[in-house]
Amino acid sequence: MRPTVVRKHESPPTMETAHMGSNLLRKSLITLASAGLGYLLTSLARQPLIWALTMAVFIGGISLVVQFLIEFDGRVSQIDRRFYMINEATELFGRIESGGLRTETAIDLVKSATQVAELGSPILTRFVDDLLLHQSDVLRQLAHQRVADHPGDEVDWMLLLTLQAQTSIKATTMVGKLSVDHKFWCSQLAETYLQLQRAAIQRRQVKVQRLFIVGADWRNDDQIRAIVRRNIAALIEVRILDALPSSGLLEFIVFDDQVCAEFPQQQTVSGDATLSPTPQLRLRPEAVQRRLDNFESWWLSAHEVDQQWLSQP
């Protein structure tokens, strides 16, 4: 029986092979042109044939050597740049490790980004590039200014910081007629937020306090009562403040007494208040301490939750 011959799949010429072929052809043409010019000039000077051929070979050889030297210099420059990038990457990974960050996360981020780019979808590539640019900008702001704006949904930071909190979460929230975000506490996202806080309390012994800022008629508001119930069911310490604080900023969350997420209000065209689409993350100790002082002062002035009021249908 005749054996079956299995031929390996021959891949088509790569871009690098094509470039090498064109580069060799270019060198050959330049060398021949230089040699021809040397032969022509020697012949015009009425030199013997042997001298004309010698000069042609000499000039062509010099031309070829110069081309190789130029290419060699270019490759050396590329190698220098690559070594510089390797050294910089090594230094960065060393700083990541010494700073307590996980190098696996950084490697996985780069790998995932390149894998997305290899999918060949222009819009997806642009999306990932913009996402990386945004996150890089946020980190740059935190590193150099200790304040960062977050254009987009503030819930991103709320959830991530809740997951990372180790000691305390102190939050102020406006509800009822003073609320500028009516739908949040009735959403599934709010349920997820409360579940994360409950897990922080039970698993990491994080002390979570929430101060609800309400209007004068809050006792007759069933929606406020339902929101308070959900928070207490999540094991959160709750108090209610019905005297509007004089501070301009009323909604913020302080995590571990070190990081403060602020949600400033802005006026709409109709004159109604709404949460700013660009919440701020503050790391400066004086800014965080200011919010801690606000919270402690308001907490002492607030009402503890009346169980009789809470149990009303």
Image (cartoon, rainbow, N blue to C red):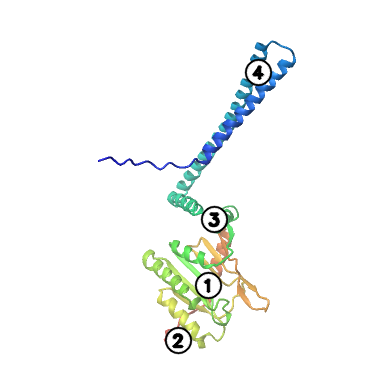
Figure check: 85 above or below 146: above
What's the residue type where badge 1 is placed? Thr
The residue identified by callout 4 is 56
Secondary element at image label 3: helix
| Disc on the earlier residue, 3 or 2 | 3
Residue shown at 58% from the left, 35% from the top? 22
Secondary element at image label 1: strand
Give percent across and percent down for residue 190: 47, 73
| Disc on the earlier residue, 4 or 2 | 4
What's the residue type where badge 2 is placed? Trp
Front: mark 4 or 3: 4
The residue identified by callout 3 is 125
The residue identified by callout 2 is 309
Residue 161's label in the rendered image is none
The residues tagged by marks 4 and 3 sit, at their Cα atoms, a distance apart of 53 Å
The residue identified by callout 1 is 172
- Front residue of 306/231: it is 231
Secondary element at image label 4: helix
What's the residue type where badge 3 is placed? Thr
* Label 4 environment density (alpha carbons within 10 Å; few <14, some 14–19, many ≥20): many
